[in-house]
Image (tube, helix red, strand yellow):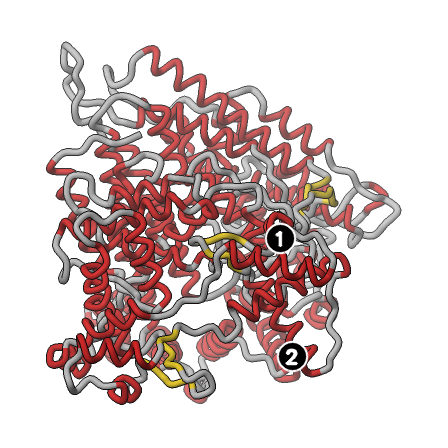
């Protein structure tokens, strides 16, 4: 769907395009902008570009036409009594016709070279028995037409060119000295050296001159093919002809380049597309000629689905899609097209057409891959077509902001990363706002508009919930993406239709979300229930899609003003809201109940394997389970959902808890219990708001409290013969660093704070009476609000021995968690902190462990312990961890941590307010955004004021 265009929208796109062109410069290709003034000066003096253009016109090219190859086939058949045909080679993909030449895919040419090399060295090499004649015949063609192939010119022809077109100072020696040509003594001929400094720095001058020499008065495709063959083969990388040729010439070049691509049958969609990719594999992929070629089918319905399908297979075949030598000429053609496109009327019309035309999938993927690095200025113009709008938002996150535009120029890489994402977020949100503005200016194709918005938001939220391992930059990226996600939802919520041609005209224009929501719901429903084969046996929750579906449902539940939504729209919204919430329920059942998962194997076939859950559920805690459970209850299905899920648990009672099936039940219980607790806490925190909106708060809270009590008691002990397993013992879980991860125990105690009545105390007593986990007990004391409940746990913890706990602990991570709870405890820190700290430090010293996060944790615990012991000498003597090659900002951060604890000691232990204020002021100057420094500085000033009074 082509979006309407006005002068205002064109100017907005132009502004965005030019900004992206500057901001996203690719410094890796800085040579493009580098000018060698010596070479440019020589060109002005001797007109070298004209001379080189005439030399190129005289170069001798190797004939690789189909007729030449067929002649070799006939010779081979005659000599070996075989019946090979050209079709035999083409059918298996060992040869292809590209730009009218018979070319050899990289894997084939590499193998032919190996055959020649190994046989010359007298070493054995395995040739597939049924392909022996193919290899022998192709080896002849390879050695005649490819091996050591050079572009050549006879000395007499070279001298004629120089005599006719060159300055007297430009001689053969002149060309040799500048490595433009070299002499081949064996064949008594001159070789053209592609990629010399002169062809690099005079590339546009030479390209422009060649065009003028070849094109004539009315150039057609024939002339362009010759022109392109000359420039491409001689290494003339064209990037800017506008400064050398007239508009009519560059427009013609653009048109003929597009026509050339259209004429290339090898680029057309076919069932052999992946075979072509596979056989063109680069050597680093270690693909062998004997390997079975996987069966891969791409989705060519539209550009978005095609790119999604390539990304789906990239997980399995990684870099196979990124470069194909036999089609590398397309990079030059795309550069010619994009850089010579008209910027008026329909800007970049041909580039957008290429990106939409899935009949030529290689071009779609190549241009898509090249835009962030080389053509970022194209991205805003993708917003002129609804099919390409989601592609624009995919590409924004692939651009790199030039460091020159970042405020932070010091060695603080983290701040640079933050600034990078601030830029990218700003651009992304501007593009999103522009899209909504466009959608709000016309009143048709709501279905198409809804799908577009859904695709954009799905891609965004998928990135928000993609967080594989701890890395400071990963955290910065996630926080920036989450902010962008929240801002995008606000924009969507508040954008109003601009032109509302209804009589009588309403007091205000309705929000665009009214007309889009049902269609967004429909697309989300489809994506939730879609089920593609997995690459691994892990059945991950579609956390991002689930969160987006809940947030969009929340938009559907917001209050609309009178006259903003019609009765028909309201009915449709109610209907589709129920459908989406039902689809979420069905998806969760599928996730929890599914026993097997389809796996895509290396050969593109699928097989069923046992499903494994619970690995990599990043962001599970930030999903609004409370709102979802309220919707389930409103639909009348919450209790049924709970009963069916619990009935699906199947324990293997004659095995231990580490059995695969029992581990699966453990993961299901743990995740479900966690969702119940998260939902229970969130509803209690925003109870009045939900009640105001007519949600069934009381019924859901009652059910959640009842189920949390029952399930926590049932699944807090290992007793497999009676179908029980300890879901709170999280040593079975496999997870990396997760900034949102909360232990089930912590969530339980937070939930207990909302339990009603005296039965909460009974529950705590029952739950803790057989619990020997010191970490869990300390966590409870630190979280529970009730003094009576804390007393119950304190009595229990007094009977536990820390030495026995340490011996039973499964991992050092558990010890670290217990250490954090111990040092934060008001009444038990003296008893537990030091034994845990000594054990962890001894372990790390023994295994020579060097982990920044663990090191920082132990450093801070030592400081806090000295503070609590009121031992300033010990606190002052604690050394700041030193590491070789650590960047300065990291070292400064650790220094600030120690100074902070010294300030706390001065403030709370010595009550030396002046020194404390001085230290905290200094820390605030260095780190103005640090909330801890600001809070304690305020505290110090307040205490000083009180003390003075």
Q: Nearer the viewer, mark 1 or mark 2?
A: 1
Closer to the camera, 888 or 503?
A: 503
Q: Is residue 669 left or right of residue 279?
A: right
Rendering quarter of residue 610: top right
Q: Residue at x 63, y 38 (%)?
A: 591
Rendering quarter of residue 189: bottom left
Q: What element carries label 1?
A: helix
Closer to the camera, 352 or 376?
A: 352
Relative vertical location of residue 647 with respect to residue 817 in this rendering, above or below = above
Q: Contact, CB < 8 Å: mark 1 with mark 2? A: no
Camera sees residue 921: no
Residue 550 % position (x, y): 45, 34
Relative vertical location of residue 44 with respect to residue 497 in this rendering, above or below = below
Q: Is residue 544 left or right of residue 734?
A: left
Residue at the far right: name it.
654
Q: What element carries label 2?
A: helix
Q: Residue at x 86, y 49 (%)?
A: 655
Closer to the camera, 331 or 68?
A: 68
Residue 843, disc: 2
Residue 282 % position (x, y): 54, 65
Characterize the local packing of mark 1: few (<14), some (14-19) or many (20 or more) Cα atoms within 10 angstroms.
Answer: some
Which residue is under mark 1?
89
Closer to the camera, 799 or 623?
A: 623
Q: Quadrant of the C terminus?
A: bottom left
Q: Residue at x 68, y 58 (%)?
A: 77
Q: Which of marks 1 and 2 is nearer the N terminus?
A: 1
Rendering quarter of residue 431: top left
Report, in whole angstroms, how far the alpha carbon at label 1 lies from the one at label 2: 63 Å
């Amino acid at each position: 769907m082509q979006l309407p265009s006005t002068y205002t929208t064109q100017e907005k796109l132009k502004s965005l395009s030019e900004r992206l062109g500057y901001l996203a410069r690719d410094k890796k290709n800085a040579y493009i902008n580098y000018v060698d003034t010596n070479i440019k000066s020589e060109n002005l003096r001797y007109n070298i570009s004209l001379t080189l253009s005439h030399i190129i016109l005289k170069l001798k090219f190797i004939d690789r036409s189909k007729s030449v190859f067929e002649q070799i086939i006939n010779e081979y058949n005659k000599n070996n009594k075989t019946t090979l045909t050209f079709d035999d080679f083409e059918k298996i993909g060992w040869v292809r016709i590209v730009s009218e030449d018979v070319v050899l895919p990289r894997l084939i040419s590499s193998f032919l070279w190996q055959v020649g090399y190994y046989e010359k060295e007298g070493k054995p090499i395995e040739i597939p028995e049924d392909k022996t004649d193919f290899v022998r015949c192709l080896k002849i063609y390879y050695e005649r037409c490819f091996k050591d192939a050079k572009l050549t010119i006879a000395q007499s022809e070279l001298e004629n060119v120089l005599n006719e077109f060159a300055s007297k100072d430009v001689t053969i020696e002149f060309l040799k000295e500048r490595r433009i040509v070299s002499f081949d003594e064996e064949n008594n001929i001159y070789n053209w050296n592609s990629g010399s400094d002169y062809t690099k720095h005079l590339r546009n001058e030479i390209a422009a001159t060649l065009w003028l020499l070849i094109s004539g008065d009315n150039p057609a495709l024939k002339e362009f093919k010759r022109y392109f063959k000359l420039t491409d083969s001689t290494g003339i990388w064209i990037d800017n002809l506008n400064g050398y040729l007239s508009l009519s010439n560059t427009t013609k070049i653009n048109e003929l380049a597009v026509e050339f691509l259209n004429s290339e049958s090898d680029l057309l969609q076919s069932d052999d597309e992946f075979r072509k990719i596979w056989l063109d594999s680069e050597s680093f992929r270690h693909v062998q000629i004997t390997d079975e070629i996987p069966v891969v089918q791409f989705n060519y319905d539209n550009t978005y689905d095609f790119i999604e399908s390539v990304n789906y297979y990239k997980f399995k075949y990684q870099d196979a899609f990124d470069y194909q030598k036999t089609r590398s000429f397309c990079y030059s053609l795309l550069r010619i097209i994009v850089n010579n496109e008209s910027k008026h009327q329909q800007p970049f019309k041909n580039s957008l057409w290429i990106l939409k035309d899935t009949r030529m999938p290689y071009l779609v993927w190549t241009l898509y891959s090249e835009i962030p690095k080389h053509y970022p200025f194209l991205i805003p113009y993708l917003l002129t077509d609804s099919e390409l709008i989601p592609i624009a938002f995919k590409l924004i996150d692939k651009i790199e902001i030039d460091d020159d535009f970042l405020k932070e120029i010091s060695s603080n890489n983290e701040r640079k990363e933050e600034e990078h994402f601030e830029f990218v977020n700003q651009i992304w949100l501007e593009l999103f706002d522009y899209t909504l503005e466009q959608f709000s200016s016309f009143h048709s194709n709501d279905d198409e508009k809804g799908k577009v918005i859904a695709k954009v938001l799905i891609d965004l939220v998928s990135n928000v919930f993609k967080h594989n391992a701890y890395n400071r930059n990963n955290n910065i990226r996630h926080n920036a993406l989450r902010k962008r996600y929240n801002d995008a939802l606000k924009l969507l919520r508040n954008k109003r239709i601009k032109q509302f041609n209804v009589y009588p005209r309403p007091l205000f224009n309705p929000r665009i979300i009214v007309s889009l929501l049902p269609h967004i719901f429909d697309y989300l429903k489809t994506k939730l229930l879609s089920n593609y084969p997995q690459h691994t046996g892990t059945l991950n929750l579609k956390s991002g899609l689930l969160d987006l579906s809940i947030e969009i449902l929340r938009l559907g539940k917001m209050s609309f003003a009178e006259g903003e939504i019609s009765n028909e729209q309201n009915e449709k919204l109610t209907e589709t809201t129920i459908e989406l919430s039902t689809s979420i329920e069905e998806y969760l059942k599928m996730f929890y109940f599914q026993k097997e998962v389809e796996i895509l194997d290396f050969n593109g076939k699928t097989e069923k394997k046992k499903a494994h859950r619970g690995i990599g559920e990043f962001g599970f805690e930030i999903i609004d389970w409370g709102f979802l459970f309220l919707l389930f209850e409103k639909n009348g299905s919450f209790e049924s959902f709970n009963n069916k899920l619990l009935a699906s648990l199947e324990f293997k009672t004659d095995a231990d808890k580490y059995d695969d099936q029992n581990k699966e039940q453990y993961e299901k219980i743990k995740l479900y219990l966690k969702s119940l607790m998260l939902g229970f806490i969130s509803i209690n925190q925003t109870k009045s708001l939900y009640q105001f909106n007519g949600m069934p708060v009381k019924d859901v809270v009652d059910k959640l409290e009842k189920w949390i009590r029952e399930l926590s008691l049932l699944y807090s002990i290992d007793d497999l013969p009676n179908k029980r397993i300890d879901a709170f013992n999280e040593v079975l879980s496999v997870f990396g660093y997760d900034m949102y991860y909360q232990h089930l125990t912590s969530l339980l105690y937070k939930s207990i704070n909302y339990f009603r009545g005296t039965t909460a105390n009974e529950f705590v007593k029952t739950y803790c009476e057989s619990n020997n986990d010191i970490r869990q007990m300390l966590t409870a004391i630190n979280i529970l609000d009730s003094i009576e409940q804390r007393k119950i746990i304190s009595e229990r913890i007094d009977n536990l021995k820390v030495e026995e706990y340490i011996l039973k602990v499964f991992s050092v991570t558990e010890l670290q968690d217990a250490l954090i709870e111990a040092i934060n405890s008001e009444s038990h820190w003296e008893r537990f902190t030091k034994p845990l700290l000594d054990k962890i430090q001894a372990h790390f010293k023994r295994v020579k462990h060097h982990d920044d996060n663990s090191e920082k944790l132990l450093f801070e615990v030592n400081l806090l312990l000295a503070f609590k012991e009121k031992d300033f000498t010990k606190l002052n003597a604690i050394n700041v961890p030193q590491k070789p090659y650590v960047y300065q900002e990291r070292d400064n951060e650790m220094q600030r941590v120690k100074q902070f604890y010294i300030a706390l000691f001065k403030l709370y232990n010595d009550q030396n307010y002046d020194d404390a204020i001085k230290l905290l002021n200094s820390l605030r100057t260095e780190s103005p955004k640090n909330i801890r420094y600001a809070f304690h500085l305020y505290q110090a000033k307040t205490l000083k004021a009180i003390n003075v009074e």
